[in-house]
Amino acid sequence: MSKSKRTPAMTLSALALVVLSMASCGGDPNSPGVEYMPDMYRSPAIEAYVDFGQDPYMFTEEVAMEQRQRQGARLPVAGTIPFAADPAKAEFNMPYAYPNTTDGYEAAGMYLKSPIEMTEATVEQGKAIYTKFCMHCHGEKGEGDGGVVKNGNYPTPPSYTAALKDLPEGKIFHSLVYGKNVAMGSHASQLNKEERWLVVQYVKYLQNGGKMQLETAATTATTAVN
Amino acid sequence: MDVPPKMLGMPLVARISERSTGLLYATLAAVLFLFSGIAHAQPADAALYATGEKLFKGNCASCHKPDKDLTGPAMKGARARWDVKGDIYAWVKNSSAYLKTGNPYATELFAKWNKSVMTAQALSNEEIDAVLYYADNYAPPPPKPGAVDASASTGTNDEGSNWPWLVVIALLLLVVGISLSGVRTSLDNAVREAEGKEPLPDMTTGQKFRQWAWNNKAFATILGLFVVVFITLKLWDAAWVVGVYGGDEVPHYKPEQPILFNHTLHAGKVEAGNLAINCQYCHSSAEKSKHAGIPSTNVCMNCHQAVAEGRSPEGTKEIAKIYAAVGWDPATLKYTGRTEPVKWVKVHNLPDHAYFNHAQHVAVGKLECQECHGPIDEKMDVAEQWAPLTMGWCINCHNTKDVKMAGNGYYDEVMARLEETDMGHAELKKYLEDEKISVRELGGWECAKCHY
């Protein structure tokens, strides 16, 4: 009697275990699950962000562990000059000459001039970059009312139409390279020099109240503001 | 009324009993204390506070905080610090001119704050007074409502978590059923015994089942077929989602990350109380490179130099992890030089034999990030894999999506070449039958487009 009863109970509990373990497997958001043929997932050649060391067919566990601990993303060697496919744009890849000091900032304001002529097309390009990289703090019109300032209790950037109305383009560029004060960091890693100058163009456009202006009209006024 | 002589001079309330005097004084003290508390939270001169706040936000807030050091020192107590050591008005109006007078406190301040020149402020003495009044009486604003908590998780697959319970209930019913059948057998035997018949043979469940199947052959066959077909179909379905960690059919892959970066808080809409930072601010290589890029910690520090506190204590802890990685001391606002990498866990694992390029899709295809990554700015804190990333998913989009041809030199060239010959022209006409040109029609279904 007791023997005949135990069999279905054991079968059932085993079934329940299998079902539950399957359920827990599928629901674990931390588990990358099964990977068919890892040698087709993991490139034997070095590929950015791919943990090729996880392939059990290529490495022993020790080597794999060591591979996993390696740092993937790195800075280029200091002084690296990017290759320019377009020789006309080669000057954008030259190192930046002004040092990250108060004197460097003032000097950039005096002598540094945009190599890009301001046209409607460049302002348009500048606007696209401004929207992605500046607007969340400086606001749509550059009045210092972006989402980060509104909702993030962030230090308010000075307005392009008031305190920074006469800020020369060299100083804007300098601030993009090194950052300004504690509240604005360096954007050199996100924007290359051409993109920085395009942003400067759009800032000049905003300073002028959203109108195109004659080239070097305000930039020749090298009065040391800010 | 029999009043003791020493109490005659007291007011009536106090006269009621000697003990109540103590109570009265305590109440008075409490009321005074309460008022002093209110006076602290709400400055006596609200108008001056408001003027000061406005001036502070317009002129000072990009370098100073009222209660914390930023580029310059905390403004609270600045007047007390200057006191007799120098002229704070002259310093605010033109610090570099005031430095030249050789005031020792000014020189000390200048040296202490990295020799960064404070911008000359065109403010009157009264306005400076207002700003200092605001700073001295500063009360931090209440936290924004609707703030998204970094620790709060958004369950995207809640409906899927029900079925283990259903299985448990089904098993319980089965157990009940089996015990009931056991009871029935005993009852049957009892009846048989009473009627003087032989008891039923003691059979195991398997034997009983086989006997039942033998007696009901047709039904058992149909049932068996159904079971086999059902299991096969289930296995077939399951095979389709092996190695798939996104999409509608499976729970999304959402690994725990070393830093619980909250995508919704950073990239969500302003109206929802979020910061509305563009995705590409941090993933800036998305339009230039094959990879969208994991931002290096210096990008975090572009803002977090000035933001050390999250909206919740948990958020503050996560920000501290960035500081540990990048080597930043929030107390001195300086880099220590001791850095360590953040070990992010890769979420979207596309097999190596499939080529995918972000720049193609973002810069040329002009797709929004959300089209593949889901509502990451609305309800995803820690990133998860939204799309299934199966080949079917890829080529379905290549088949239906129309190519945005305008303003792209590559497509201009394609169009020019198509219109050059009669054959090309006919082909183009065929493409445009549904009034759009899909990626497939331009070769987006060629194997070698993605597999090479």
Image (tube, helix red, strand yellow):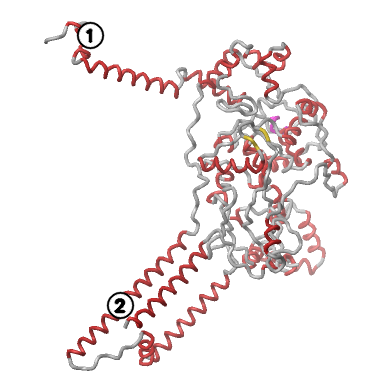
Q: Which of marks 1 and 2 is nearer the N terminus?
A: 1
Q: As shown in the figure, which amino acid type bears the numbered disc 1?
A: Met
Question: Which residue was labeled with disc 1?
Answer: B10
Is label 1 in a helix, a strand or a loop? Answer: loop
Residue B252: mark in rendering = none
Image position of B384 with respect to B124: above or below: below
Left or right, B337 with reference to B230: right
Name the residue: 60% across, 50% down: B258
Question: Which residue was labeled with disc 2?
Answer: B179
Mark 2, Cα crowd under 10 Å, few <14 / some 14-19 / many 20+, is: few
Residue B438: image location, x then y, percent: 68, 63
The residue sitting at the left extreme is: B1
Q: As shown in the figure, which amino acid type bears the numbered disc 2?
A: Ser
- Residue A95 at least partly seen: yes
Residue A50: image location, x then y, percent: 69, 59
Image position of B36 with respect to A87: above or below: above
The residue sitting at the bottom extreme is: B197
Residue B83: image location, x then y, percent: 58, 12
> What is the chain letter for disc 1?
B
Image position of B412 with respect to B336: above or below: below
> What is the chain letter for disc 2?
B
The residue sitting at the right extreme is: A87
Which of the pair B238/A192 is nearer the observer?
B238
The alpha-carbon separation of the residues under discs 1 and 2 comes to 88 Å
Please give the range of residues in magenta: A204-208
